[in-house]
Structure formats: C-alpha cells, structure tokens
Amino acid sequence: MPPERITSLQNPRVKQLVKLRDRRPRDEAGVFLVEGYREVRRALEKKVALQELYFAPDWFLGENEPALIAEAEAAGARLFELSKDAFAKVAYRERPDGLLAVAPQWRRALSDLVLPPEPFLLVVEAIEKPGNLGTILRSADAAGCHAVIVCDPVTDIFNPNVVRASTGVLFSVPLVVEESANVLQWLREKGVKTVATTPSATAPYSDTDLRGPMAVIMGSEQYGLSEFWLKNSDFPVRIPMAGQADSLNVAMATIITLFEAVRQRAAR
Amino acid sequence: MPPERITSLQNPRVKQLVKLRDRRPRDEAGVFLVEGYREVRRALEKKVALQELYFAPDWFLGENEPALIAEAEAAGARLFELSKDAFAKVAYRERPDGLLAVAPQWRRALSDLVLPPEPFLLVVEAIEKPGNLGTILRSADAAGCHAVIVCDPVTDIFNPNVVRASTGVLFSVPLVVEESANVLQWLREKGVKTVATTPSATAPYSDTDLRGPMAVIMGSEQYGLSEFWLKNSDFPVRIPMAGQADSLNVAMATIITLFEAVRQRAAR
C-alpha cells in the first residue's frame, strides 16, 4: 500500500505528533516518539512494534532510508510521507534526518526481570534531566548492566530527549520504573548488595568490593541520594575528586562507578 | 561610578555581545563571553581580568549577585546594567541568570606549563563539539590532570558552549592549544609516556600501567585517533564494551580512562 502523503501543517496527525512531546498526551495514547535513523533502526532490531513511521525524503542524510522504511512496513508500521515543511514541524531535533516513528509504551515490573546468578544492576533515583537519564542508560548498556531501575521518577522514561540521549539504548537495556521501598525489598530478597555513591561516604568506590550480586545506587542531580537510600544501602562509597567541587555530574559519577565494577568483575 | 544603563536592543554594545558568539569577532577583539553566576565567580576566583560585566536584576535567581558585581567592579570590570529585554538579547543560554562578562582571551604555550615530576596529562585531538570539549575539561579537573592539551583544534576553546559545558573549569585547568607533532616531541622530551584509547587496541586500559609521567590521548568524535597518534603512541589501549557499539562517546571514554589512572596512581 502506498504511503499516505501529508503536506498540510494543519493535518491532525501532524498536530498529534507535536502533542506527543508532552507527557500527558503520550500517556493517554500509550505511545511515544522515536526520531532518527539510528533510533528507529534499534527499535526495529529489538522487535518494537512501531505503529507509524513518518518520513520525509527531503531531509534524508544517507541512502539507507528506503530499506529501513520497507523493513518498518514489513514489521507492521503504517507509513506516511511528509513534505519538508510538514516534517520540520513534527521533528523535535534541531537537525532532523527525515524519520520519526510512533512506538507503543511498555511497563516492565521487577518480577519481569530475568537475571543471572550474579546480577549487576543500576538503580537511579529521581533523575531530573532527560539528557542525563539517556546518557546514564548508554553507560549502563556499555557496562553490561543486566537492568536499570528508575526509582520515584521525575522524568518520564518516554520523554523524546531520553530516547535521543540514549541513542536508542532505551530499547535494549531492561528498564523498570518502581518505588524505592519496593526496589529495596526486592533487592534484599534477591540477595543483591547495594552500593550507594555519595560525597558523605568515607570509603573510596574503588576500594569496595563491587563483585557478586550488586546494585549501584545513584541519587538525583540536585539533591543526591535520599535519606531512604543513604540509610538502607549496604556500602556507601565516594569518588575521590580533585578540582572544583561540582566537576562530576550524576552521569559522570555513574559511568566511573559502573566501569570500576566492570573492571573488578572481569578480573575475578 | 554608577553603571551605564542599556535598554535599547539597538545599542552597539548589545550588538557586539551577540557578535561575540562567533569566532572571528571574538578573535578580532581578543575576548570571549562568560555567562552565568557560577562561571563569572570562577573567573574572578582565578583572577581573570574581566573587562566588562553586564547584569540584569530582572533575571537574577538568587541574592548573591550584588556582591559578585561589586567584586567584579573592584577587580576592574566596567559595569553595565541592562533591561530585561536587552539582557534576553545578549544571553546565549536558554535560561539566563542575568550575568554576562567579557573576558580577555589568552594563549598558553607548552613551555608555559609548570609540571610536577610525574605529570598526569590529557591530550585531545580535533574534538568537534563544544559541549564535549567542555565536559572533557570538567573530567580532567575532577581527575586532577595537571594540564589539558588540545591538538589541531576544530572547536575554539573560547566558544560560549565550551565555557558553559566546562562550568567555568576552563579558568582553572591549564590548557594549551598546539599541533600534534609539536606535542609529541614535547612529551618525548619530558619523558611522558602516551596512552592512546582506540577500539583497535587489544590491551584493556585497566591492565595497562597508568602511573608515572603519562598522557592519555583521545581522538575526535567522528574519526577517533588520527594515524599520527595511532602510530606514535607508546601504549594503545581499549575500553571493553558490552552493548551497542557506539554507547560510549568520547567524553565518556575519557572519564573512564582518567579515573582508572587516578585509581592506579593513588594505589601506589
């Protein structure tokens, strides 16, 4: 079936795509936006059932777009071809590449996670900036974390800027959103020790045993770890810092801690 | 002397401040822009001779601005009070905080660097994105690098987004811009070994001795390390990665390598 063509900026679908940048319309529709070649490709690789794919050849940067579009159609996505102007309106990136998909949201529970005998987990608390959450997901992917658990979220995991900053890793890293108390209880039931990074700790992170079943706990940008996690974590650790007090942000502290764990776990 | 007041968007100073976002006018005037409370504070702490300070009380976020303005004036900066609209025009941040300074550019040569017996250096090659360069400067500051050397720069170190992403660390980390060939010769003269991070290496970065006089060499976002550094570095190393091939960007790879060096150097 040939794709429907959209040229009017007043088209209801164009208006709906713009609305999906905000959380409430996203949640009401149960979908979210996936913009960009790399991100759409990763969604297809991970068998995400894209509902719609909007494309605008005027914005294409390469030659592989038609193959990707055909793949999306074969996987069940409905296609829409947009004029340059119409795509400019629906794109949320500064430099669009002519591809924007609508994907279904999902909810994973802690009980859905399939974990190895010695899980390596990342728990992040109330991260505020979508860009930080996306970068943290990339770090967890690169470090080989078995899952990322977002506690008491301030940022919607389906925010377009999370998808973008994660470069589509959102589709590959198992991700659960859950309340802190439930997460702690579940970690204890599973025998997973908790390592909380905080400037108030005295033990350097790299002198702490990060092997075995283990979860790294990271706090929010502005407030750091909550009292709940500070009180209940098994091992508070700190990252020694030279220079300015605020030179490490939460995404940087996360990747340092995760890769020290990778180093220790590989060296066994 | 009371500050000059500026309310017109057509004021020549307003126009000049907007121009200074671009490199050529910056270089011609020999100055650059420093926006934001934290950044201006750090410039003053580091005795940077701010030439001008533009402020707009309508945008202030806190109560410490008047003290900072007085400090800048005492240090020789000429003051200008702007209307809300005029400041909105000169601000390059999305959320201005009512403070914008003009600082003199500087040039440091390799021979200006004062180094300890066992220098810990970072060399970055042709980084393209100002945000990445700024983040890398923060990482080098947090890791306690003695200097950062930018080879064959694509990005101007005085780009407003470098200043912003570095959160003002630009003023505290010794920074030199120099050609690769000169940098290599200087490192060899100083007896500094070079450790180059590249996916083509076989040795894991954490199995390599990162103690003693040492420089970490990082390539550009798009092309990685040049042939020059690949051929001439003493120790090529790689960061083991799980997940998607491009999950680590250059800023993330840099911080992982720098903090492994910090760990090894502290453990001596």
Image (cartoon, coloured by chain):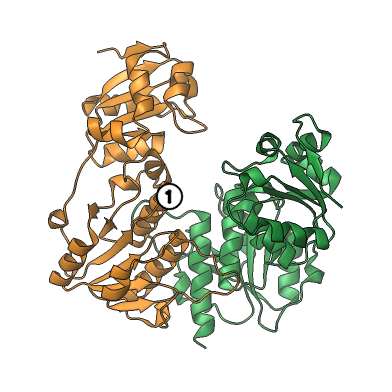
Chain colours: A orange, B green
Residue at image coords 29%, 39%: A43
Decide if residue B200 is in sight here. Answer: no
Residue B163, above or below A238: above
Whether residue A237 sits left or right of residue B47 in the image: it is left
Decide if residue B8 is in sight here. Answer: yes
Q: Chain of mark 1?
A: A
* Residue B94: percent from left, percent from top: 57, 41
- Answer with the quarter of the image where residue B206 lies: bottom left
Q: Residues within 10 Å of mark 1 (few under 14, many from 20)?
A: some
Whether residue B83 sits left or right of residue A63 in the image: it is right
Of the pair A168 and B227, the residue shown nearer to us: A168
- Answer with the quarter of the image where residue B211 lies: bottom right
Residue most extreme to the bottom = B268
Whether residue B189 sits left or right of residue B246 in the image: it is right
Whether residue A8 sits left or right of residue B124 in the image: it is left
* Residue B61: percent from left, percent from top: 58, 51
* Residue B216: percent from left, percent from top: 59, 68
Residue at image coords 62%, 52%: B164
Residue matched to label 1: A129
Of the pair B198 and A15, the residue shown nearer to us: A15
Residue B260, above or below B44: below
Of the pair A127 and A7, the residue shown nearer to us: A127
